[in-house]
Image (tube, rainbow, N blue to C red):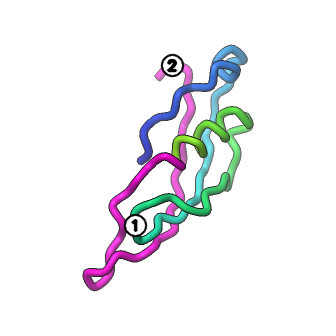
Amino acid sequence: MPPPPNYPASARRNGEEGVVLLSFLINQAGQVELSKVLQSSGSSALDEAALSALSQCRFTPATENGKAIAIRVTIPYVWRLNQ
């Protein structure tokens, strides 16, 4: 799971919460590629913050027969003001 992004100030002021569903590729080097929002949280600020944080993440690549491979991953990110 990526580290939690900072809650966008505008979304916090407006009381925006929601769940954004992210889809992305982890390449053989563990870098995020081809990330996109599959399901919006209903807030463009929250969606963009989740994508931005995800782009900075690095993962241990998946392996098959001892070799690193690229895999597609889908994760939800839950935005709650009282967390």
Q: Position of residue 20 (x, y in %)?
A: 62, 44
Q: Disc 2 marks which amino acid?
A: Asn
Q: Position of residue 17 (x, y in %)?
A: 64, 28
Q: Is 26 in the magenta?
A: no
Q: What residue range appears in magenta?
A: 55-83
Judge whether 17 appears above or below 78 on screen.
Answer: above
Q: Residue furthest left?
A: 66
Q: Residue at x 41, y 71 (%)?
A: 28
For disc 1, the marked residue is: 29
- Name the disc covering residue 81, or none: none
Q: Residue at x 70, y 20 (%)?
A: 10
Q: Position of residue 30 (x, y in %)?
A: 40, 62
Q: Residue at x 50, y 58 (%)?
A: 32
Q: Earlier in the sequence, mark 2 or mark 1?
A: 1
- Disc 2 or disc 1, which is closer to the eye? 1
Q: Residue furthest bottom?
A: 65
Tag 2: Cα neighbours inside 10 Å, few (<14), some, or many (≥20)?
few
Q: Position of residue 67 (x, y in %)?
A: 31, 80
Judge whether 40 appears above or below 66 on screen.
Answer: above
Task: For marks 2 and 1, give the CA distance.
Answer: 36 Å
Q: Residue furthest top?
A: 13
Judge whether 81 appears above or below 64 on screen.
Answer: above
Q: Residue at x 33, y 61 (%)?
A: 60
Q: Disc 1 marks which amino acid?
A: Ala
What is the secondary structure assignment of the residue under circle 2? Answer: loop
For disc 2, the marked residue is: 82
- Quadrant of res 2: top left
